[in-house]
Image (spheres, rainbow, N blue to C red):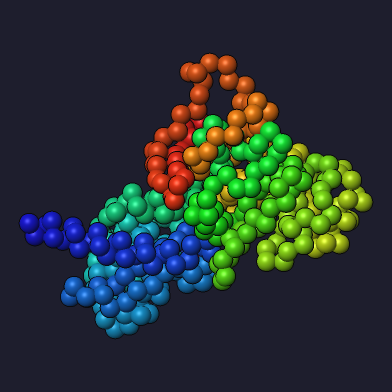
Amino acid sequence: MIDDKMNDFDSSMMRRCLELAQKALGKTAPNPMVGAVVVQNGQIVGEGYHPGAGQPHAEVFALRAADHLARGATIYVSLEPCNHYGKTPPCVEALIAAGVAKVVVGMVDPNPQAAGGIEKLRSAGIEVVVGVEEEACRQLNEAFVHRILYKRPFGILKYAMTLDGKIATSSGHSSWITDLAARNVVHQLRAACDAVIVGGNTVRHDNPHLTSHQVEARNPLRVVMSRSLELPENAYLWETEEAATLVLTQVGANPDLQKLLLRKGVNVVELDSLTPDKVMSYLYDLGFLSVLWECGGILAANAIAEGAVQKIMAFIAPKIIGGDGAPSPVGNLGFQQMTEALTLERINWQTIGPDCLMEGYLPLRR
Ligand SMILES: Nc1nc(O)c(N)c(N[C@@H]2O[C@H](COP(=O)(O)O)[C@@H](O)[C@H]2O)n1
Ligand SMILES: [Zn+2]
């Protein structure tokens, strides 16, 4: 009974850490979102979260808030305290200096450069408990974990389709498939991602804004993949200033068209080859954690085939438009047999207004 109460208390403190961590949603790349809470005699005496790269870690803010009450206290932190000099000094040293008695950790840090904090704390005589609300901690930082393990940003393919699997009519009309509530969820998703990618066709046909459409919310970098650079001169992506736009093209792309874009304030970068994996590698080097693919079916199929997509978010509207030529969200993957189908894992369904959102993860590539 006492143990159950303790577990419930630990869980609720860790949940609070996760709530705090999410205050920096979309702002921490390449760092994780982390929250920390200092508890003395069953009362919270200090809280903190990591606001972004280069700034102090969550533990440091929580210790500062707790001040002298940190001595003998328990600190809850959603990620193992770091044990390295990165952009900031090691949190383990701050915890030892503050005299905390116990550290409760949500999940072990997958970053080998920062790891070793748990051992260091234990060898300083501090009690350490690991794995409270571990699944929720991992979920919050799935993009960070993926980035560390695979040296690529975490890719999410998002699309909206009708009940009969179309993303536009056969004449190319796609506004709007889903209702406003679902579109608001997409806007929040953009605010949480570091970049959103489309192909040249999407710019030519849909002229999207690709912003979060929210006052004060941050916007992702808008990335266009285009070999030809034959893009509309007055696209919203370069006519609107609320977010930066980057056009990725291939070495040798038309220099006049490149200059035209540069004059419009668009950054143009030539890659050796313009493939989804090369693009993800480039965005990894920029320090990005999560990338949203909002492209058409051909690029989506290539991104899936090259392992640039880990998670699918499919918005499904209760509408039927028919049309043999109407495009579908994923182009040709070359599969001939049902047994080849990519079957999503860890699926979640929810309704959003009249629409449905199905989320799931692609199987890990071996
Ligand atoms: N435990 C913990 N709390 C935080 O608030 C954090 N941001 C981290 N991050 C870990 O440390 C690395 C970044 O270190 P610098 O900010 O460059 O000093 C990051 O990759 C994580 O491993 N950990
Ligand atoms: Zn730290």
Foreground of the two, 295 or 14? 295
User: Which residue shows up at 65% across the image and 36% down it?
Assistant: 169
User: Which residue shows up at 40% across the image and 45% down it?
Assistant: 350
Q: Residue 248, how many percent across, how many down?
A: 75, 48
Residue at the limit of the structure toward the top, as seen here = 337
Residue at the limit of the structure toward the right, as seen here = 256
Q: Residue 78, how many percent across, how many down?
A: 35, 60
Q: Residue 6, how many percent across, how many down?
A: 16, 61
Residue at the limit of the structure toward the bottom, as seen here = 68
Count of numbered marks: 0
The image quarter in which residue 304 lies = top right
Q: Is residue 340 left or right of residue 49?
A: right
User: Which residue shows up at 82% across the image and 51% down it?
Assistant: 232
User: Which residue shows up at 61% across the image and 38% down it?
Assistant: 167
- State whether residue 37 is above or below residue 361: below
Q: Residue 153, how many percent across, how many down?
A: 57, 48
Residue 262 seen from this side? yes
Residue 88 seen from this side? no
Q: Is residue 122 left or right of residue 138?
A: left
The image quarter in which residue 218 lies = bottom right
